[in-house]
Image: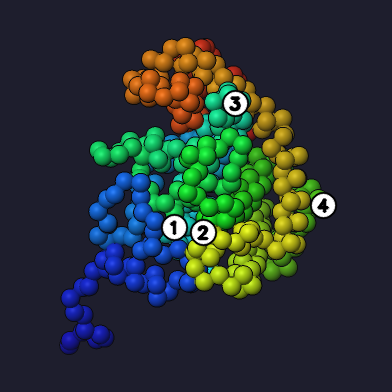
Protein backbone atom coordinates (compact mmCIF):
# COMPACT_ATOMS: atom_id res chain seq x y z
CA UNK A 1 0.00 0.00 0.00
CA UNK A 2 1.30 3.45 -0.87
CA UNK A 3 1.86 6.23 1.60
CA UNK A 4 -1.15 8.29 2.65
CA UNK A 5 -1.22 12.06 2.69
CA UNK A 6 0.51 14.80 0.79
CA UNK A 7 3.32 13.90 -1.54
CA UNK A 8 6.65 15.37 -0.56
CA UNK A 9 8.80 17.05 -3.10
CA UNK A 10 12.30 18.49 -2.82
CA UNK A 11 12.98 20.18 0.53
CA UNK A 12 12.98 23.95 0.14
CA UNK A 13 15.58 25.46 2.41
CA UNK A 14 14.67 28.69 4.17
CA UNK A 15 17.29 31.25 3.27
CA UNK A 16 17.83 34.60 4.93
CA UNK A 17 15.83 36.24 2.17
CA UNK A 18 12.92 33.86 2.83
CA UNK A 19 13.04 34.56 6.55
CA UNK A 20 13.08 38.30 5.89
CA UNK A 21 10.06 37.98 3.63
CA UNK A 22 8.23 36.00 6.32
CA UNK A 23 8.91 38.82 8.77
CA UNK A 24 7.24 41.33 6.45
CA UNK A 25 4.24 39.04 6.03
CA UNK A 26 3.72 38.37 9.73
CA UNK A 27 5.15 41.17 11.89
CA UNK A 28 3.33 44.39 12.68
CA UNK A 29 4.35 47.50 10.68
CA UNK A 30 5.85 49.09 13.82
CA UNK A 31 8.16 46.10 14.42
CA UNK A 32 11.87 46.26 13.62
CA UNK A 33 12.53 44.28 10.44
CA UNK A 34 15.88 42.58 10.12
CA UNK A 35 16.31 43.61 6.48
CA UNK A 36 16.05 47.25 7.61
CA UNK A 37 18.91 47.05 10.10
CA UNK A 38 21.19 50.06 10.23
CA UNK A 39 24.09 47.65 9.98
CA UNK A 40 27.20 46.88 11.96
CA UNK A 41 30.26 48.89 12.87
CA UNK A 42 32.36 46.60 10.65
CA UNK A 43 30.98 45.34 7.36
CA UNK A 44 30.45 41.60 7.00
CA UNK A 45 28.93 39.26 4.45
CA UNK A 46 25.25 38.75 5.25
CA UNK A 47 24.35 35.41 6.86
CA UNK A 48 23.03 32.71 4.53
CA UNK A 49 20.50 30.84 6.70
CA UNK A 50 19.82 33.37 9.46
CA UNK A 51 18.55 36.90 9.70
CA UNK A 52 20.88 39.57 11.03
CA UNK A 53 19.21 39.48 14.46
CA UNK A 54 19.41 35.68 14.61
CA UNK A 55 23.14 36.00 13.97
CA UNK A 56 23.35 38.49 16.85
CA UNK A 57 21.52 36.14 19.19
CA UNK A 58 23.86 33.27 18.33
CA UNK A 59 26.96 35.40 18.83
CA UNK A 60 25.77 36.44 22.27
CA UNK A 61 25.03 32.85 23.34
CA UNK A 62 28.46 31.69 22.17
CA UNK A 63 30.34 34.52 23.90
CA UNK A 64 32.55 34.05 26.94
CA UNK A 65 30.70 36.82 28.74
CA UNK A 66 27.43 34.90 28.43
CA UNK A 67 28.96 31.71 29.86
CA UNK A 68 30.38 33.62 32.82
CA UNK A 69 26.88 34.70 33.87
CA UNK A 70 26.41 31.19 35.30
CA UNK A 71 28.72 32.09 38.17
CA UNK A 72 27.60 35.64 38.91
CA UNK A 73 25.29 36.71 41.71
CA UNK A 74 21.66 37.58 41.08
CA UNK A 75 20.57 38.30 44.69
CA UNK A 76 22.18 35.54 46.73
CA UNK A 77 25.90 34.95 46.30
CA UNK A 78 26.66 32.32 43.70
CA UNK A 79 26.90 28.93 45.38
CA UNK A 80 24.46 29.82 48.16
CA UNK A 81 21.93 27.21 46.99
CA UNK A 82 21.35 24.84 44.11
CA UNK A 83 17.91 26.24 43.30
CA UNK A 84 18.61 29.96 43.59
CA UNK A 85 18.88 32.15 40.51
CA UNK A 86 22.20 33.11 39.04
CA UNK A 87 22.73 35.94 36.57
CA UNK A 88 22.51 33.34 33.78
CA UNK A 89 19.21 31.75 34.82
CA UNK A 90 17.79 35.23 35.32
CA UNK A 91 18.87 36.17 31.79
CA UNK A 92 17.24 33.07 30.28
CA UNK A 93 14.01 33.84 32.16
CA UNK A 94 14.06 37.44 30.91
CA UNK A 95 14.45 36.19 27.34
CA UNK A 96 11.48 33.83 27.72
CA UNK A 97 9.20 36.55 29.10
CA UNK A 98 10.36 39.04 26.48
CA UNK A 99 9.64 36.64 23.62
CA UNK A 100 6.12 36.00 24.91
CA UNK A 101 5.32 39.71 24.99
CA UNK A 102 6.95 40.33 21.60
CA UNK A 103 5.00 37.46 20.05
CA UNK A 104 1.70 38.80 21.38
CA UNK A 105 2.43 42.24 19.90
CA UNK A 106 3.79 40.83 16.60
CA UNK A 107 7.22 42.31 17.20
CA UNK A 108 10.54 40.85 16.11
CA UNK A 109 11.13 38.01 18.57
CA UNK A 110 14.72 37.42 17.45
CA UNK A 111 15.75 41.02 18.13
CA UNK A 112 13.89 41.04 21.45
CA UNK A 113 15.59 37.82 22.53
CA UNK A 114 19.05 39.03 21.50
CA UNK A 115 18.70 42.20 23.57
CA UNK A 116 17.40 40.21 26.55
CA UNK A 117 20.25 37.70 26.37
CA UNK A 118 22.88 40.45 26.25
CA UNK A 119 21.36 42.86 28.77
CA UNK A 120 23.49 41.74 31.75
CA UNK A 121 26.78 40.90 30.02
CA UNK A 122 28.34 43.92 31.71
CA UNK A 123 27.24 42.99 35.23
CA UNK A 124 30.18 42.59 37.63
CA UNK A 125 30.54 39.88 40.30
CA UNK A 126 28.53 40.13 43.53
CA UNK A 127 25.42 41.69 42.02
CA UNK A 128 24.38 45.29 42.40
CA UNK A 129 26.66 45.69 45.40
CA UNK A 130 29.62 44.91 43.16
CA UNK A 131 28.35 47.48 40.68
CA UNK A 132 28.17 50.11 43.42
CA UNK A 133 31.75 49.38 44.46
CA UNK A 134 33.09 49.71 40.90
CA UNK A 135 31.13 52.92 40.39
CA UNK A 136 32.87 54.44 43.42
CA UNK A 137 36.31 53.16 42.39
CA UNK A 138 35.86 54.59 38.89
CA UNK A 139 34.13 57.82 39.96
CA UNK A 140 36.97 59.98 38.60
CA UNK A 141 37.18 57.96 35.40
CA UNK A 142 33.61 57.95 34.08
CA UNK A 143 32.03 55.76 36.75
CA UNK A 144 30.58 52.30 36.17
CA UNK A 145 27.08 51.35 35.04
CA UNK A 146 26.32 47.80 33.95
CA UNK A 147 24.14 48.70 30.94
CA UNK A 148 26.91 50.81 29.46
CA UNK A 149 29.40 48.08 30.36
CA UNK A 150 27.30 45.54 28.44
CA UNK A 151 27.81 47.69 25.35
CA UNK A 152 31.56 47.79 26.04
CA UNK A 153 31.60 43.99 26.28
CA UNK A 154 29.96 43.45 22.88
CA UNK A 155 31.78 46.35 21.20
CA UNK A 156 35.31 45.87 22.50
CA UNK A 157 36.05 43.33 25.23
CA UNK A 158 34.99 40.09 23.55
CA UNK A 159 37.80 38.89 21.26
CA UNK A 160 36.60 36.16 18.88
CA UNK A 161 37.02 37.48 15.37
CA UNK A 162 40.21 38.22 13.40
CA UNK A 163 39.12 41.50 11.78
CA UNK A 164 37.54 43.40 14.67
CA UNK A 165 37.15 43.60 18.41
CA UNK A 166 33.89 42.71 20.08
CA UNK A 167 30.98 40.78 18.60
CA UNK A 168 30.14 43.37 15.93
CA UNK A 169 26.42 43.21 16.74
CA UNK A 170 23.79 45.08 14.77
CA UNK A 171 22.95 48.68 15.62
CA UNK A 172 19.49 47.66 16.86
CA UNK A 173 20.80 45.21 19.47
CA UNK A 174 23.42 47.71 20.66
CA UNK A 175 20.72 50.37 20.91
CA UNK A 176 18.67 48.02 23.09
CA UNK A 177 21.45 47.61 25.65
CA UNK A 178 21.32 51.28 26.68
CA UNK A 179 18.32 51.85 28.91
CA UNK A 180 18.85 55.54 29.60
CA UNK A 181 21.34 58.35 29.56
CA UNK A 182 23.21 58.69 32.83
CA UNK A 183 25.57 61.25 34.31
CA UNK A 184 28.47 58.87 33.69
CA UNK A 185 27.64 58.08 30.09
CA UNK A 186 30.19 58.97 27.44
CA UNK A 187 28.48 61.17 24.79
CA UNK A 188 30.75 59.74 22.12
CA UNK A 189 29.66 56.21 23.01
CA UNK A 190 26.00 57.16 22.96
CA UNK A 191 26.14 59.14 19.73
CA UNK A 192 23.54 57.94 17.24
CA UNK A 193 21.27 56.24 19.75
CA UNK A 194 17.81 57.79 20.18
CA UNK A 195 16.57 58.87 23.58
CA UNK A 196 14.27 58.61 25.37
CA UNK A 197 12.66 56.00 23.08
CA UNK A 198 14.16 52.98 21.42
CA UNK A 199 12.57 50.19 19.40
CA UNK A 200 9.53 48.43 20.84
CA UNK A 201 11.66 45.29 21.02
CA UNK A 202 14.17 47.07 23.26
CA UNK A 203 11.36 48.43 25.43
CA UNK A 204 9.87 44.95 25.80
CA UNK A 205 13.23 43.45 26.84
CA UNK A 206 13.62 46.20 29.42
CA UNK A 207 10.23 45.61 31.03
CA UNK A 208 10.65 41.83 30.86
CA UNK A 209 13.80 42.27 32.94
CA UNK A 210 11.77 44.03 35.62
CA UNK A 211 9.03 41.38 35.57
CA UNK A 212 11.60 38.61 35.90
CA UNK A 213 13.77 39.98 38.66
CA UNK A 214 11.04 41.12 41.02
CA UNK A 215 8.97 37.96 40.59
CA UNK A 216 11.87 35.54 40.74
CA UNK A 217 13.71 37.38 43.52
CA UNK A 218 10.48 36.98 45.44
CA UNK A 219 10.57 33.26 44.68
CA UNK A 220 14.19 32.99 45.88
CA UNK A 221 13.34 34.90 49.04
CA UNK A 222 10.64 32.33 49.79
CA UNK A 223 13.02 29.48 48.94
CA UNK A 224 15.52 30.66 51.55
CA UNK A 225 12.90 31.37 54.19
CA UNK A 226 13.72 35.09 54.37
CA UNK A 227 10.21 35.84 53.07
CA UNK A 228 6.96 34.19 54.22
CA UNK A 229 3.74 33.75 52.27
CA UNK A 230 1.53 34.85 55.17
CA UNK A 231 3.36 38.19 55.44
CA UNK A 232 3.21 38.69 51.69
CA UNK A 233 -0.54 38.04 51.71
CA UNK A 234 -0.99 40.76 54.35
CA UNK A 235 1.35 43.39 52.92
CA UNK A 236 1.65 42.92 49.14
CA UNK A 237 -1.53 43.21 47.10
CA UNK A 238 0.03 41.72 43.97
CA UNK A 239 0.90 38.55 45.87
CA UNK A 240 -2.52 38.35 47.54
CA UNK A 241 -4.25 38.73 44.18
CA UNK A 242 -2.22 35.90 42.64
CA UNK A 243 -2.57 33.68 45.72
CA UNK A 244 -6.35 34.18 45.78
CA UNK A 245 -6.52 33.26 42.10
CA UNK A 246 -4.59 30.02 42.71
CA UNK A 247 -6.77 29.12 45.69
CA UNK A 248 -10.05 29.76 43.87
CA UNK A 249 -9.02 27.73 40.81
CA UNK A 250 -7.13 24.85 42.43
CA UNK A 251 -8.09 24.69 46.09
CA UNK A 252 -5.50 23.46 48.57
CA UNK A 253 -2.14 22.59 47.00
CA UNK A 254 1.10 21.22 48.47
CA UNK A 255 3.28 24.05 49.79
CA UNK A 256 5.94 23.91 47.08
CA UNK A 257 3.46 23.64 44.22
CA UNK A 258 1.31 26.46 45.66
CA UNK A 259 4.25 28.82 45.98
CA UNK A 260 5.64 28.14 42.52
CA UNK A 261 2.25 28.41 40.87
CA UNK A 262 1.49 31.68 42.67
CA UNK A 263 4.72 33.16 41.30
CA UNK A 264 3.75 31.84 37.87
CA UNK A 265 0.37 33.58 38.09
CA UNK A 266 2.05 36.78 39.25
CA UNK A 267 4.25 36.74 36.14
CA UNK A 268 1.33 35.83 33.90
CA UNK A 269 -0.74 38.76 35.19
CA UNK A 270 2.11 41.18 34.47
CA UNK A 271 2.73 39.83 30.97
CA UNK A 272 -0.96 40.12 30.11
CA UNK A 273 -1.14 43.63 31.54
CA UNK A 274 1.92 44.82 29.58
CA UNK A 275 0.71 43.29 26.31
CA UNK A 276 -2.80 44.71 26.57
CA UNK A 277 -1.70 48.13 27.83
CA UNK A 278 0.98 48.43 25.15
CA UNK A 279 -1.43 47.43 22.37
CA UNK A 280 -3.78 50.25 23.42
CA UNK A 281 -0.93 52.75 23.57
CA UNK A 282 0.32 51.74 20.13
CA UNK A 283 -3.14 52.24 18.64
CA UNK A 284 -3.51 55.66 20.27
CA UNK A 285 -0.04 56.75 19.11
CA UNK A 286 -0.78 55.70 15.53
CA UNK A 287 2.80 54.55 14.92
CA UNK A 288 3.36 52.85 11.57
CA UNK A 289 7.08 52.09 11.66
CA UNK A 290 10.00 51.51 14.00
CA UNK A 291 11.19 55.06 13.30
CA UNK A 292 7.77 56.37 14.38
CA UNK A 293 8.27 54.53 17.67
CA UNK A 294 11.64 56.19 18.25
CA UNK A 295 10.13 59.62 17.68
CA UNK A 296 7.67 59.23 20.57
CA UNK A 297 8.03 61.39 23.68
CA UNK A 298 7.80 58.38 26.00
CA UNK A 299 7.97 54.60 25.87
CA UNK A 300 4.91 52.85 24.50
CA UNK A 301 5.65 49.58 26.33
CA UNK A 302 4.32 50.15 29.82
CA UNK A 303 2.23 48.72 32.65
CA UNK A 304 -1.27 49.98 33.31
CA UNK A 305 -1.41 52.58 36.12
CA UNK A 306 -2.93 50.00 38.51
CA UNK A 307 -0.29 47.40 37.72
CA UNK A 308 2.45 49.97 38.17
CA UNK A 309 1.14 50.78 41.66
CA UNK A 310 1.03 47.09 42.54
CA UNK A 311 4.61 46.59 41.35
CA UNK A 312 5.86 49.64 43.20
CA UNK A 313 4.44 48.20 46.41
CA UNK A 314 6.12 44.84 45.67
CA UNK A 315 9.39 46.64 44.93
CA UNK A 316 9.34 48.53 48.24
CA UNK A 317 8.60 45.30 50.09
CA UNK A 318 11.50 43.46 48.46
CA UNK A 319 13.95 46.24 49.25
CA UNK A 320 12.86 46.38 52.87
CA UNK A 321 12.56 42.64 53.53
CA UNK A 322 15.00 41.01 51.10
CA UNK A 323 17.61 43.20 49.42
CA UNK A 324 18.44 45.10 52.63
CA UNK A 325 18.00 42.04 54.83
CA UNK A 326 21.30 41.62 56.73
CA UNK A 327 21.52 37.97 55.67
CA UNK A 328 21.60 39.09 52.04
CA UNK A 329 23.18 42.52 52.24
CA UNK A 330 26.05 41.85 54.62
CA UNK A 331 27.53 38.83 52.79
CA UNK A 332 27.20 40.71 49.49
CA UNK A 333 28.98 43.74 50.95
CA UNK A 334 31.75 41.64 52.49
CA UNK A 335 32.24 39.89 49.17
CA UNK A 336 32.10 43.12 47.16
CA UNK A 337 34.71 44.60 49.51
CA UNK A 338 37.14 42.13 47.96
CA UNK A 339 36.83 44.07 44.71
CA UNK A 340 38.35 47.15 46.35
CA UNK A 341 41.44 45.19 47.36
CA UNK A 342 41.73 43.58 43.93
CA UNK A 343 41.35 46.93 42.19
CA UNK A 344 44.25 48.42 44.18
CA UNK A 345 46.41 45.35 43.65
CA UNK A 346 45.90 45.22 39.88
CA UNK A 347 46.43 48.95 39.53
CA UNK A 348 49.80 48.66 41.28
CA UNK A 349 50.75 45.35 39.65
CA UNK A 350 49.10 45.07 36.23
CA UNK A 351 50.93 41.83 35.38
CA UNK A 352 48.78 40.13 38.03
CA UNK A 353 45.89 40.44 35.56
CA UNK A 354 47.62 38.32 32.94
CA UNK A 355 49.26 39.38 29.70
CA UNK A 356 46.18 40.22 27.63
CA UNK A 357 44.58 42.36 30.35
CA UNK A 358 47.90 44.04 31.07
CA UNK A 359 48.26 44.93 27.40
CA UNK A 360 44.77 46.47 27.45
CA UNK A 361 45.87 48.51 30.49
CA UNK A 362 48.88 49.80 28.56
CA UNK A 363 46.69 50.86 25.62
CA UNK A 364 44.04 52.72 27.59
CA UNK A 365 43.36 54.59 30.80
CA UNK A 366 44.68 52.24 33.55
CA UNK A 367 41.72 52.48 35.94
CA UNK A 368 39.23 51.70 33.18
CA UNK A 369 41.26 48.67 32.07
CA UNK A 370 41.31 47.33 35.64
CA UNK A 371 37.57 47.98 35.95
CA UNK A 372 36.96 46.06 32.72
CA UNK A 373 38.96 43.13 34.01
CA UNK A 374 37.22 42.97 37.39
CA UNK A 375 33.73 43.45 35.93
CA UNK A 376 34.22 40.39 33.75
CA UNK A 377 35.02 38.16 36.74
CA UNK A 378 32.68 35.56 38.15
CA UNK A 379 32.05 35.46 41.89
CA UNK A 380 34.20 32.35 42.09
CA UNK A 381 37.16 33.76 40.18
CA UNK A 382 37.09 37.02 42.15
CA UNK A 383 37.18 35.02 45.38
CA UNK A 384 40.07 32.87 44.16
CA UNK A 385 42.00 35.93 43.02
CA UNK A 386 41.48 37.60 46.40
CA UNK A 387 42.77 34.50 48.17
CA UNK A 388 45.77 34.34 45.83
CA UNK A 389 46.74 38.00 46.10
CA UNK A 390 45.43 39.14 49.49
CA UNK A 391 44.47 36.36 51.87
CA UNK A 392 41.49 34.32 53.11
CA UNK A 393 38.18 35.57 51.73
CA UNK A 394 35.49 36.96 54.04
CA UNK A 395 33.19 34.34 55.51
CA UNK A 396 29.95 34.04 53.55
CA UNK A 397 26.90 32.43 55.13
CA UNK A 398 25.00 30.13 52.77
CA UNK A 399 21.25 30.01 53.13
CA UNK A 400 19.90 28.09 50.17
CA UNK A 401 18.82 24.46 49.99
CA UNK A 402 20.76 21.91 48.01
CA UNK A 403 19.73 18.75 46.26
CA UNK A 404 17.14 17.91 43.69
Cα separation between marks 3 and 1 = 33 Å
Q: Identify which residue is drawn at 50% across, 50% down.
A: 193
Q: Nearer the viewer, residue 34 or 80?
A: 34
Give the SS element for disc 2: loop
In the figure, 107 relative to 57: above or below? below
- Tell me whether the residue at label 4 lies in contact with that at label 1, contact meaning CB atoms closer than 8 angstroms: no
Mark identifier at residue 199: 2
Q: Earlier in the sequence, mark 2 or mark 4?
A: 2
Residue in the picture at 52% in, 12% down: 391
Residue, disc 4:
234
* SS at badge 4: helix
Q: Label 3, secondary structure: give it.
A: helix
Q: Nearer the viewer, mark 2 or mark 4?
A: 2
Considering depth in this image, is 34 or 1 the residue closer to the camera?
A: 34
Q: Residue at x 50, y 63 (%)?
A: 291
Question: Looking at the picture, how far across and down is residue 224, in whole percent?
Answer: 65, 39
Label 4 or label 1, whichever lies nearer to me, is 1
- The residues bearing labels 3 and 2 have C-alpha atoms spaced at a distance of 31 Å
Mark 3 is surrounded, within 10 Å at the Cα level, by few (under 14), some (14 to 19) or many (20 or more) other residues, namely: few
Give the distance between the C-alpha atoms of the residues marked 2 and 1, in whole angstroms. Answer: 10 Å
Disc 3, disc 2: CB below 8 Å?
Answer: no
Q: Which mark's residue is nearer the viewer, 3 or 1?
A: 3
Q: Is residue 328 left or right of residue 92?
A: right
- Residue 111 — which label? 1
How far apart, in angstroms, are the residues tagged by discs 4 and 1? Answer: 40 Å
In-front residue for pair 245/123? 123
- The image quadrant where one finds the N terminus is bottom left
Disc 3 marks which residue?
139
Disc 2 to disc 1: CB gap under 8 Å = yes
Amino acid sequence: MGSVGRRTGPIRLRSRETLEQEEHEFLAPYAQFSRDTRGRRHSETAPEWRTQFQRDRDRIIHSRGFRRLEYKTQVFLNGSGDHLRTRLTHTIEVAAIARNIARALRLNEDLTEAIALAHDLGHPPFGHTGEEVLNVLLADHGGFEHNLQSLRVVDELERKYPRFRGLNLSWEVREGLLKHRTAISDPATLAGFPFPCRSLEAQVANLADEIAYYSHDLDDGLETGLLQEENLAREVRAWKRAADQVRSQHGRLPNECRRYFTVRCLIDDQVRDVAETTARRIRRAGVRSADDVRSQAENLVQYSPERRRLNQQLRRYLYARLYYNPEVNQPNRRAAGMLEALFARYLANPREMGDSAARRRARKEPCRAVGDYISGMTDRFATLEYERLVGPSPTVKHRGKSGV
